[in-house]
Amino acid sequence: MDGRHAELVRLLWGPHPKRARGPRPTLDLERIARAGIEIADADGLADVSMQRVAAHLGVTKMALYRYVPGKAELVALMADAAIGPCPVPEGASGGWRGQLEEWARRLAEGFARHPWVLEATVGPRVMGPAELSWLERAVAALDGTGLSGAERMDAAALLAGHIRALTRQARAAGPAGDAEAQLGAILGELMQAHGDRFPALTAALASAVESNGQDQAWEFGLQRILDGLAALIDRRDTRAR
């Protein structure tokens, strides 16, 4: 692990140096992260800078650097604080499927509250304890299903990918929301003019309108992923008998 990663691990996971005797420090990592979150929630991740966070906290940028070495580390702290620890479910109602449904909905709610977290949590990187607790919860939900450790991790990644993709789509729809309905309206106009070239799509759109089937991609995708996992688990169970 290189020095930059080692420093990020220390910031996210500790241990943090004990405070020496004397006046209480004006800053701590939690306050710094919360200041960055407030800026990102209001104006987006691109507007977060060490200078702006320092001004938000009423300190100099050099004072901020005593706690956080740079923006990359700041954003990592912000993302872990914004995501927060995965809530502990009350019981294990619904078995693995019920647990993963609840997990997916709560994760989607978190991304909706802080959509900039989608940008901050991509690619190989050091994850903090809060973010990692979500992976732990999803993998633990599939314990005892017969799936291998790698398959349980892949299942969590597949679910998270679905949630991230649909959250991005909803965000792209803007204040009006309902990205799927907007897309359906645009496609409907195109099919009115060019439907003879796309007969299957034209028929599918007409059926969706008749059945009020718009804005169901999130739920449809979630249930199909869980159906696929259920089929795989059943197949493993049959082989084990």
Image (cartoon, grey):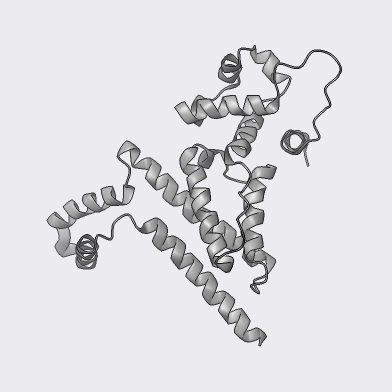
Residue 91: which quarter of the image?
A: bottom right
Q: Residue lying furthest left in this view?
A: 193
Instruction: Say which residue appears at 46% left-offset and 61% top-offset.
Output: 222
The picture places residue 65, in percent across and down from the top left corner, at 70, 19
Q: Is residue 40 above or below residue 201?
A: above
The picture places residue 105, in percent across and down from the top left corner, at 49, 53
The picture places residue 198, in percent across and down from the top left corner, at 21, 63
Instruction: Say which residue appears at 38% left-offset and 45% top-offset.
Output: 170
User: Depth check: 21 or 186 in front?
Assistant: 21
User: Depth check: 81 or 54 in front?
Assistant: 81
Instruction: Say which residue appears at 19% left-offset and 54% top-offset.
Output: 188
The picture places residue 110, in percent across and down from the top left corner, at 51, 43
Instruction: Say which residue appears at 50% left-offset and 25% top-offset.
Output: 47
Q: Is residue 216 left or right of residue 195?
A: right
Question: Where does the N terminus fall, quadrant-wise?
Answer: top right
Q: Is residue 113 above or below residue 42?
A: below
Q: Residue lying furthest bottom in this view?
A: 241
